[in-house]
Image (tube, helix red, strand yellow):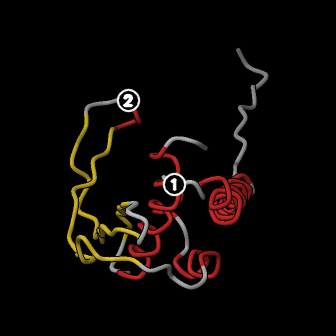
Amino acid sequence: MSERRDWMGVLARSQPQRLADLLGPLPAHEMLRNPEIGAVMVRGRAGAAGAPFNLGEMTVTRCSLQLQGGLVGHAYVQGRDKNHAIRAAIVDALMQGPQSATTREAILAPLQQDQSSHRAATRAKAAATKVEFFTMVRGED
């Protein structure tokens, strides 16, 4: 996971309390854009390949900040949790500096593992409800 969009996605999908536990005390930072709550339009595609359509709106919180060393971080997270947005922006800033390898190992890798486990559990739960249909052939032509 080296691309910024990848780690931003992991941070956006993370559980706020889990991110707080992994990050620990917040480093010194200055807010460039205080956390703001707004809405974005979610688009969908019929059958994942059809024409796009507006599915509905989703609440998001965005934030921009600068760490003491000058690194700037941004975050967009689902919902109204301002602290989640601040922590995600801090991790984004840390990932752009010399601490990126440490941050990846200590914060992003566990979050990514949590999300992989959650997806696997969801797939297993869905697979348990799968119904196999078969056709019986009658003896008549």
Q: Which mark is residue 35?
A: none
Q: Quadrant of residue 90?
A: bottom left
Q: Position of residue 98 (x, y in %)?
A: 57, 54
Q: Which mark is residue 49?
A: 2
Q: Secondary structure at mark 2?
A: loop
Q: Amino acid at mark 2?
A: Ala
Please indicate, yes or no, whether residue 126 appears anywhere in the rendered image: no
Instruction: Give the residue pinned by disc 1.
Output: 97
Disc 1 crowd, CA 10 A, few/some/many (<14, 14-19, 20+): some
At a point 50% along the width and 82% down the height, the residue shown is: 26
Asked whether, in this view, residue 94 is left or right of residue 74, the answer is right
Asked whether, in this view, residue 5 is left or right of residue 99, the answer is left
Along the polypeptide, which appears first: circle 1 or circle 2? 2
Q: Quadrant of residue 50?
A: top left
Q: Secondary structure at mark 1?
A: loop
Q: Quadrant of residue 32?
A: bottom left
Q: Position of residue 69 (x, y in %)?
A: 43, 66
55 shown above or below 66: above
